[in-house]
Amino acid sequence: TFPVARLISAISKAITLIPGDIISTGTPAGVGVFRKPPVFLKPGDVVRITISNIGTLENRVVSQEEFLRQSQK
């Protein structure tokens, strides 16, 4: 395990955290590498984080090639 306070400390040394920032940590049991066969995020998948009474944040997974193409525009 990695204590949340230590995680916040490490992240805040690299970037400035401001009120409203979200740090998403880990995955629940039964997902990803621990599945048989393993399941990983792939381009086109959507990562969705919902907080009651606040809203939903969605991010689409893209390939490295697509990311580089979009970042050069």
Image (cartoon, rainbow, N blue to C red):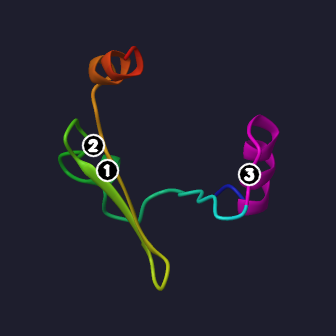
Q: Are marks 2 and 3 in contact (CB under 8 Å)?
A: no
Q: Is residue 21 above or below residue 65?
A: below
Q: Residue at x 40, y 14 (%)?
A: 72
Q: Quadrant of the C terminus?
A: top left
Q: Residue at x 48, y 85 (%)?
A: 53
Sequence-first tag of 1 and 3: 3
Q: Is residue 11 left or right of residue 45?
A: right
Q: Which residue is mark 1?
A: 32
Residue depth check, mark 2 versus mark 3: number of the one nearer the observer: 3
Q: Are marks 1 and 2 in contact (CB under 8 Å)?
A: yes
Q: Is residue 20 left or right of residue 31?
A: right
Sequence-first tag of 1 and 2: 1
The magenta stretch is 4-18
Cα gap from disc 1 to disc 3, whole angstroms: 28 Å
Q: Is residue 24 above or below residue 54?
A: above
User: What element does badge 2 sit on?
Assistant: loop
Q: Quadrant of the N terminus?
A: bottom right
Q: Is residue 43 magenta?
A: no
**Residue 59 at x, y percent in the picture:** 35, 49
Name the disc covering residue 40, or none. Answer: 2
User: What element does badge 1 sit on?
Assistant: helix
